[in-house]
């Protein structure tokens, strides 16, 4: 990951409440523990869905508290999770993005490609796609 062993690895993970995104969170936490890192969890929501986004983050926070890792969270208003992950990663200098292979997605994702595919294609840092 391009870091010295003593440096903390910064991991960004996208969650949407799906079982695959929950598995991505589990892997992100495992990486953070193995590499003395920290995790930032983001969820992207559409207008009118802020309450659902906060519920998704509350579940993630509970898991992160149980595991005892350094973390932060953010709910981002938008319609493009891949862009939100890429932009957050670039602006905040993350070392690794972790995503599930499939989330809830939308009909548009069939046309645009899955979030994980877009993140892999466009991210400037390493990406871990969690399949199962």
Image (spheres, helix red, strand yellow):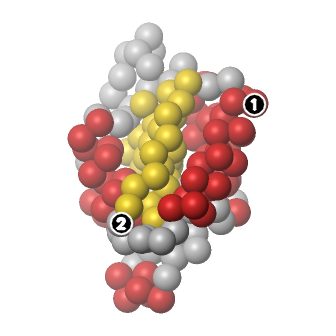
Crowd around label 1: few <14 · some 14–19 · many ≥20 (10 Å): few
Q: Which residue is mark 1?
A: 66
Q: Quadrant of residue 84?
A: bottom left
- Looking at the picture, tell me which residue is in the foreground, 12 or 126: 12
Q: Position of residue 39 (x, y in %)?
A: 51, 34
Placement of the N terminus among the 4 image quadrants? top left
In the drawing, what numbered circle is on residue 16?
A: none
Residue 128 vs residue 71, the one in the foreground: 71
Q: Quadrant of the C terminus?
A: bottom right
Up the image or down, 90 lies above or below 3; here it is below
Q: Position of residue 107 (x, y in %)?
A: 47, 89
Instruction: Assign a secondary structure to mark 2.
Output: loop
Q: Is residue 33 left or right of residue 71?
A: right
In this rendering, which labeled residue sits more in front, label 2 or label 1? 2
Residues at discs 2 and 1 in contact (Cβ within 8 Å)? no
User: Left or right: where does residue 112 sit relative to residue 110?
Assistant: left
Residue positioned most to the top: 6
The relative height of residue 39 versus residue 98 in the rendered view (above or below) is above
Marking on residue 78: 2
Residue 90 in view: yes
């Amino acid at each position: 990951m391009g870091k010295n062993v003593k440096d903390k690895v910064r991991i960004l993970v996208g969650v949407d409440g799906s079982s695959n995104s929950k598995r991505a969170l589990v892997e992100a936490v495992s990486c953070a523990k193995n590499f003395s890192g920290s995790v930032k969890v983001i969820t992207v929501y559409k207008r009118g869905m802020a309450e659902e986004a906060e519920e998704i983050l509350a579940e993630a926070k509970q898991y992160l508290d149980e595991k005892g890792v350094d973390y932060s969270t953010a709910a981002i208003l938008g319609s493009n999770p891949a862009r939100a992950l890429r932009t957050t990663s670039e602006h905040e200098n993350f070392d690794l993005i972790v995503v599930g292979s499939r989330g809830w997605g939308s009909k548009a994702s069939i046309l645009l490609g899955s979030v994980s595919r877009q993140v892999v294609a466009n991210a400037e840092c390493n990406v871990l796609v969690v399949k199962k």
